[in-house]
Structures are given as structure tokens and as C-alpha cells.
Image: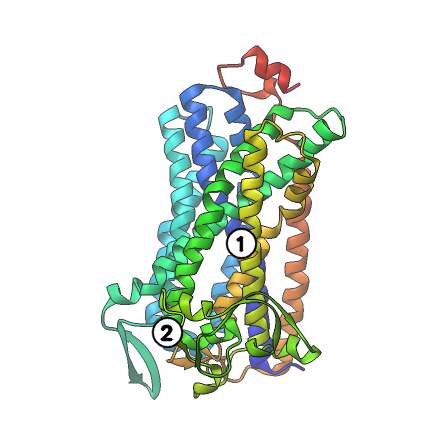
Amino acid sequence: MIDPTIASRLQFALTVMVHIIFPVMSMGLAPFLVWFTVQEVRTGRPIYEQLRRFWTKIFAVSFVIGTVTGLVLEFEFATNFATFATVAGELFGGPLALEGMMAFMLEATFLGVFVFGRERVSDRLYVVSSVAVGLGTWLSAVWILIANSWMQTPRGFELVTENGQRVVTLTDPLAAYLTPRFGYMFVHMQNAAIESVALFMAGVAAYYVYRHHIRGHSVEAIAFWETTLKIAIVALVITAPLQVLHGDAYARHVAQSQPQKFAAMEAIWETGSYVPEYIVAFPTTLDGVFDPRTRELFGIAIPGFASWLVSGGNPEATIRGLESFSTRAPPVAIVFWSFRIMVALGFWFIVLAFWSAFRWRRGELFEDDLLHRALMLSAPLGIVAVEVGWIVTEVGRQPWVIQGVLQTADSVTPGLSGQEATLTLLGFVAGYTGLLVLYAVVCRWLIVSGPPAIDELTATDHSSEEVSSNG
């Protein structure tokens, strides 16, 4: 049987990595749905009703499965990490309770109006419902990221002894809830969600545009997919460069506040200055895959650039190496390669965004075979980037579950046996695999079914041009 600490960490990692897919979809879709709704009410054009109704279905499915998978996470604090829950309960209780009472209830309440109430409420109330659903979705992220950012850079508390147990007591809730890390995490996460959804929308739309314009097949509602592709490209042009620019500032903050994590991200073992930044890195031996060390890698490196990035302009700046820390290093290979995958994907998304925009400007957007293939293959890559980004964030913090306060090995539930932890881990693997398959099947069915037909719409401006172009 697996060690209970390892099994618990694997189970929580599995739960989070599956769960995050659904909040990303719902948070990323929320701004699009608000805009579709406002434009539908303002213009009465049927294309906006089609967009709103089609993508609302994807949103609703993501919300339902995200709720199921998310609730389990909170129970795991007690079943697998009871010591952590005891130590940090005073801080975690507030954000998690507010996430449920404020964000989830706001989203769940107005989602009923948004999904089923278009013909039952006024236009104004319907727009309010779309905004409330989007706001609730984003407020959920606020409270979850408040809790996580405190784990990364804890402050506003003191440790006291209660019944022989050292526990966190809040001394400054404002400082604890609004740590320096929160702003970086929130902007990076929310922008990543919009970017990921834009990639998904572009990939799905590109498939139908490719079939119609390149392969010559008849596609119903082709105007819908052409419009979806253009909207997704606009979103990508905005979010892709912002993600890379903000990511640079975020990494600099990590270097200052969590130097051990940054050293793992760059595989820097020995303290030094004029540290190169590897844009592309390859291990020269098999050991280099599992134990990467910057100076032993082969690739394209910019001399002194890592030091320049960390300091904000000084290529001679010193970066602490992993060997200078008293605590055990994080799993460097996982952090180092995950970080490089995330960065590489970030730059690829920029290329994809401006490639698409260039073709659009030239009037060749619908005829570029290679671009359509690239968009289709890139549809899931936004989610992949989010996953590896969270791996860097969470694995890079090890061996700490609360940075500098509580180690992960000391946070597991006392008395939890290896057999219990292993059996539940296997059960979670089976259950969450089933949920992923179910989600994929339902989304595929919705996409294949396509948007509602023109004669099913309630919008008033059914122009002959749009009717004919939508079949």
C-alpha cells in the first residue's frame, strides 16, 4: 500500500486537476455570455441569441460537474488533511464559507433565471441575471484564491497553542485575506480562463469552418461558427500577450517571496549571479530528465537573463540556489519541466492569436488550411497550460503546505492508514475518470447538435441575410 501522505497528496492532486477544468470553462465563458446577452437585448440580432443559447449549455454542464467535483475538495481537508484543517481552520473557514454563501448561491440562484427565464422575465432582469451569474463565478475564484494565496505567502496571523495543538489565529484579517500574492494569482487565473475558453471556442469553430470552406462540406449555421471564430480570435489577441506580460511580473514576485520555488522553476542548485535563462532546454542525459540542473542542460540560453528577470534589470543579480535552503527541495523535475511547458504554450498562443488576426485582416481567415488545423489541435491546450501552471504553484511550494509554517508531511490526518488512503485514491481515479468521460461525451453531443435553428429563436431582427447564411 502507498504511504498515506503520498496517497493523500496524489488524491488531492487528482481531485484538483480534474476539478479545475470546469471552473476554467465556467469562469472563461462568463464574460462571453454577458456580452452575448447584452448584444442580443440591445440589437435583437438572432446571431447573438444563438451564441448565448449554445454556449450557455456548455456553461451549465461545466457548472454542474464543477460543483460536484468541488464539494469533494472541502471534505478532503477533513478526511485526508485533518491536521492542516485544525491548524488553518480559523483562516480557511471564512473564505470557504463566503465562497459558498456569497458566490455559489448568487451564481446558482440566477443561473436558473439565465437558463430558463428568457421568455419569463424582462430584458433588463435577464441582463442582470447574466451579470449575476458571471459575478458569482468570478467571486468563487476570489475566495478560493484568497485562501490559496495565503498558503503561499501567509501573513496577518500568529501561532498559538490550544489544547496542545499549534493553530493559526487571525490578528489582521485584511492582511491575511489580501496578501501580495492574491492580485497576481487572480489576474493570472482569470485571464487564463478567458484565454482557455477562447482557444476552445476557436478550435471548435475552426473545425466547422475547415469542413465548409476547405473540404467543401455543407455545414448548417456556418455564419454562427464564423462569428464564433472571429470573437475567439479577438479574445486571444487581448489575453495571450497579457498572460505572458503578467506572467513575467508574477514570476518576479515569486522569486522575491518564494525563492526556493523560483530556484526549482529554473533548476538552479548553486547560488550564483549572471544566471542564464533557458528559452529552450534539453537534458543531455537520462538523469537530466529526472534531475535537471541548469548548467548541465543543452539548449538556447540568454546569459544573465534569469538574473535580469528576477531583479527587474540587473543581469548580475544573485539568485539563491536550492542547496542554500535548509528544507528539502521540491520535486525539481516536475516544477522545472511544467514551468517550461507553460511558458512555451504561452508564447504559442501569442503566435496563434496574431497569425489568426493577420489572416483575418488579409481576408483569408476562412481559407487558411494550416491555421484551421493549428486552432483545432490547440483547442485543449489552454486547459493544459492551466494544469501545468497549477503544478508549478503547488508542487513548487513543497515541502510546505503553508509556506514556512506547516509542512505537508505534518498536515495529514493522524491515524490514516496506507490501506485506507490507497483504496480511496483508487476509488477517486475511477470516479473522476468517469466524470471526465461523461463531460466529454455531453460536450461533444452539444457541439455536434450545434446552435438552435433560426426558426427556434425569439430575437426580433431575423434579417434575410442571416437566415440564408444559417441555412
Residue drawn at 51 percent across, 72 percent down: 266
Q: Nearer the viewer, mark 2 or mark 1?
A: 1
Q: Position of residue 44 (x, y in %)?
A: 46, 19
Which numbered disc covers residue 378?
A: none
Residue 55 visible? The answer is no
| Position of 204 relative to 37 (above/below) | below
Tell me how many marks there are.
2
- Residue 105 spot, x, y in % from top left: 40, 48
Q: Is residue 359 left or right of residue 48?
A: right
The quadrant of the picture occupied by the N terminus is bottom right
Judge the density around disc 1: few (<14), some (14-19), many (≥20) Cα neighbours within 10 Å.
many
Name the residue carrying label 1.
346
Quadrant of the image for the C terminus?
A: top right
- Closer to the chain start, of discs 2 and 1, is 2
Q: Height in image: 308 above or below 205?
A: below
Amino acid residing under circle 2: Ala
Q: Which mark is residue 88?
A: 2
Task: Indicate the position of residue 259 as horizontal and vertical percent values.
Answer: 41, 75
